[in-house]
Image (cartoon, rainbow, N blue to C red):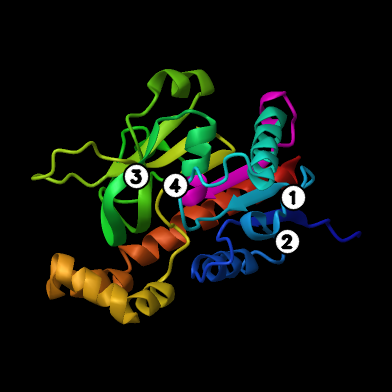
Amino acid sequence: MPKQKKISLAILDMYENAPNEGMRCIRAIVQELSDFVDWQEFDVRYKNEVPNKKFDIYISTGGPGSPFDGEGKEWEKKYFDLVDTIWAHNQNGNKSKKYLFAICHSFQLLGRHFDLGNICQRRSNAFGVFPVHRTEIAKQDHFFHSLPDPYYVVDSRDWQMIEPNYEKMKALGASILAIEKKREHVELERAVMALKLSNEMYMTQFHPEADAEGMLRHFANPERRNKIISSHGDWKLEDMIRSLSDPLKIPLTHKEIIPSFLRSAINAIKMN
């Protein structure tokens, strides 16, 4: 019996050569599925490497800086051309679909590209472990329905999406799946934290790939540690660290979202 051909997966590295834990986490998740998947990395922003449309699955990572930094640059044009190609492929009645999961910086880029809302700079950096809330639609979603409300995520951002463009979302068939935690004493609009663009394309502002190992390394950094303590107190840092070992918090988010998305995509592709 001939050996079944593996599914092709592209990791789009958006970190622009900055130190990060995201790539390690994504590699580890993908490696768990290596019996079914062949994968390749592309350094999009630093080396201007953008994959072609031959891949079955794409994971587009987080990264530093403004989501407007790439305006007019070749890599951004090629990146958006790829996104449009994936979208058109899925909308044009092709039986075998292509799948995309976009994280943090990539979430903001897709928000810009599809005009999904106001992509703007936050008043202050968000970094740490935070609760987010599911929408009613998320409670029926294939990858989010099993998560509690709220569930806990690793968040690291200077930019955000607020003021959703509901008219554009309706035209695309997109749905909001999560919003930022409610802040009782802050009169600011809560940011969108997760979106379903289509059955094949998902995007999260937070880092579902993040694990305890990477976050503990972040917290061990004196500058980050002191910033959290000065802004929120020792108790907040201790609470974040506890969230990393609580199986119903960060480990649950890490286990549920991207692995479930990838397994579902693999199964759908194998059936076609």
Amino acid at circle 4: Thr
Q: Earlier in the sequence, mark 4 or mark 1?
A: 1
Tags 4 and 2 touching, CB below 8 Å: no
User: Which residue was labeled with disc 1?
Assistant: 51
* 159 and 128: which is toward the camera: 159
Amino acid type of disc 1? Pro
Residue in the picture at 50% in, 56% down: 62
Q: Measure the C-alpha gap from mark 4 to mark 3.
A: 17 Å
Foreground mark, 4 or 3? 3
- Percent across and percent down for residue 14 are 58, 56
Say if the magenta span includes residue 99. yes
Q: Quadrant of residue 81?
A: top right
Q: Which residue is mark 4?
A: 204
Q: Quadrant of the C terminus?
A: top right
Q: Amino acid at mark 2?
A: Gln
Q: Is residue 239 visible?
A: no
**Considering only vertical position in the picture, is 92 above or below 33?**
above
Q: Position of residue 54 (x, y in %)?
A: 79, 45
Task: Give the CA separation, mark 1 to mark 2.
Answer: 9 Å
Relative horizontal placement of residue 222, taking residue 20 as reference (left or right): left
Is the C-beta separation of discs 1 and 2 under 8 Å? yes
SS for callout 4? strand
At x 73%, y 61%, the residue is 40
Q: CA distance from mark 2 to mark 3?
A: 32 Å
Please tell me how crowded label 3 is: few (under 14), some (14-19), or many (20+) other residues with Cα within 10 Å. some
Magenta region: 90-107
Instruction: Looking at the image, tell me whether mark 4 or mark 3 is earlier in sequence order.
Output: 3
User: Which residue lies at the image location 69% right of the left edge and 66% below the top edge?
Assistant: 34
Q: Amino acid at mark 3?
A: Gln
